[in-house]
Amino acid sequence: AATQQIEYRYLAKATGKEDYKKSEKVFDILDKITPEDGLLFEKLKEGGENGASFITASKSSFGAMGDSAYEYMIKLWLQGGRKEEMYRKMWDKAMNGVHEQLLQKSTPNGLTYIADRLNGGRLDHKMDHLACFMGGSLALGAYTDPSGIDSSRAKRDLKTAKALTYTCYQMYARTQTGISPEFVQFRGGNDFKVPSSAPFYILRPEVVEAFYYLSVLTGDPIYREWGWEVFQSIEKYCKTEYGYGSLHDVNEPSMKPEDRMESFFLAETLKYLYLLFDPDSEIDILNKHVFNTEAHPFKIFNN
């Protein structure tokens, strides 16, 4: 419900048809019913008092079923020329909730990760590959903070962005193929492990997405180095005669790729890798463009 507003707002502006902007009502509703900690639950239902929508007690996650709603808070604010305060306030409120409730450190090396929060407040110490988008979004939020990049909030968010992205890099570097599984579990004394229930890789983009944002925003060459490592692993283990395939188990380098290639591999994974190494890109993520959740750049509204 909260992952289509960038697209419909652009359609409204391009066509002059204001009906497309009705999708924004979703965030108006979410703003009213979001808990004080800013963390959304997965399930939104209708049928409350006077027919109002309400959030049911379920999981709060920056992985599957929750990631893009947070991503669009900061990006809608940017798309609108940083004028629609509701979106920025929702983002900052949620990031406070992340730091106060979900951000964790592994044992023994203190890797930063975002845990899931289950019904009742218990934490599930796992992190999806999907959640690695937060490295890029936190950095973007820090560099566009209304209080400035030197503010305490911006410094906090950028520090977390870098630490989180390092963890996501380790999710690749520590497997036999150099490729990350669908998620990792932070248990025991070896930081994290690849779960038996999800050792697969389906060509996801979120980690190289984070590399791209941090490379552009900080200028640190390490993100290109990590991106090159990931690209080489994809080339070695996922490439087939006619495309690229998913891996059944990232710790089984002898296995051949599956006959399956998700559309987001071309739309996002390869695009972010290309842009990571493109010195002449006209994309300007601070002043001119905002990427939707499928890595399509949209122009920022200037009026």
Image (cartoon, grey):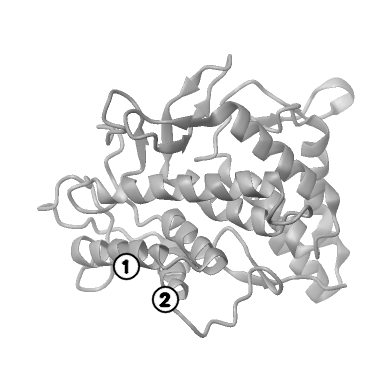
Report which quarter residue 47 is drawn in.
Answer: top right
In this picture, is 68 found above or below 203?
above
Q: Is there any visible trace of residue 178 in the rendered image?
A: yes
Residue 81 picture location, percent across and down: 80, 65
In this picture, is 153 found above or below 210?
above
Residue 227 picture location, percent across and down: 36, 64
Report which quarter residue 262 is drawn in.
Answer: bottom left
Q: Are marks 2 and 1 in contact (CB under 8 Å)?
A: yes
Q: Secondary structure beneath disc 2?
A: loop
Residue 264 picture location, percent across and down: 45, 61
Quadrant of the frame with the N terminus: top right
Query: Which residue bears the numbered disc 2?
Result: 277
Q: Is there any visible trace of residue 1 in the rendered image?
A: no
Q: Residue at x 21, y 45 (%)?
A: 249
Front residue of 44/296: it is: 296
Q: Residue at x 78, y 49 (%)?
A: 87
Q: Secondary structure beneath disc 1?
A: helix
Q: Is residue 187 left or right of residue 101?
A: left
Residue 228 is tagged as 1
Q: Residue at x 34, y 66 (%)?
A: 225
Front residue of 25/166: it is: 166
The residue carrying pointer 2 sits among few (fewer than 14), some (14 to 19) or many (20 or more) residues within 10 Å by Cα, namely some
Given the current orientation, which residue lies at the most extreme left position? 254
Given the current orientation, which residue lies at the most extreme bottom position? 280
Comes first in the chain, label 2 or label 1: 1
Kindly identify the amino acid type of the residue bearing the numbered disc 2.
Phe
Front residue of 117/164: it is: 164
